[in-house]
Amino acid sequence: MPLEPQYVPTRWAKKPKDVTDQLTEQMQMLVGLDYQVRMLRERPWASITFSGLRCQFAIVPLWRGGRAISQSCGARLLHYPYDLHGYFVADLVIERPADGRDQTVIVEILAIDDPVVR
């Protein structure tokens, strides 16, 4: 009787990227190399019919005195068709600093578990 091939995980095997990794990479591509996208918080979210994640990110200039992301870059973040395996972006909010000193921009994203893909 032949043996069935089995997947044997190794320490070098790549783990699949989770939704926050995918969002971080795609936002980093949109804002460019002058900024760093940092994941601040991820928490489960659910309604009666859907479930997903609410993720909060900071977009920080990489040098002291750098400016916050521009309006056009913010528009790209808002309207970009994020490609997330098993999820879709249902809501995205960009919070700009109230005072002019802190140039960190906060982005909050609601990613819903896509029932069609899962």
Image (spheres, rainbow, N blue to C red):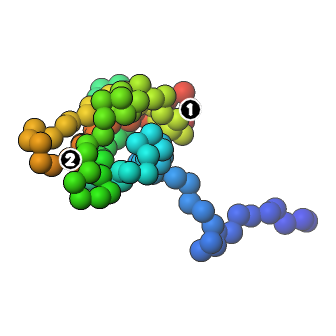
Q: Which residue is rendered at x = 26% and y = 34% of the image?
A: 94
Going from N to C along the chain, the mark reached first, 2 or 1, is 2
Q: In the image shown, does 48 or 19 lie closer to the viewer?
A: 19
Quadrant where the N terminus sits is bottom right
Residue lying furthest bottom in this view? 11
Closer to the camera, 10 or 37? 37
Task: In this rendered view, identify the residue nearer to me: 100 or 83.
Answer: 100
Image quadrant for the C terminus?
top right
The answer to whether the residues at label 2 and label 1 have Cβ atoms under 8 Å apart is no
Q: Is 82 on the left or on the right of 90, as rendered?
A: right
Three-letter code, disc 1: Val
Rendered location of residue 83, percent (x, y): 52, 35
Q: Mark 2, mark 1: which one is toward the viewer?
A: 2
Q: Is residue 87 visible?
A: yes
Residue found 47% across the figure and 48% down from its top: 25
Q: Quadrant of residue 93?
A: top left
Q: Which residue is mark 1?
A: 117
- Marks counted in the figure total 2
For label 2, the residue is 103
Mark 2 packing: few (<14 Cα in 10 Å), some, or many (20+)? some
Is 65 placed left or right of 115 in the picture?
left
Helix, strand or loop status at disc 2:
loop
The three-letter amino acid code for the residue at tag 2 is Gln
Residue 110's place in the image compared with 15, above or below, is above
Q: Is residue 37 visible?
A: no
Residue 70 tag number? none
In percent of the image, x 37 and y 34: which residue is there? 73
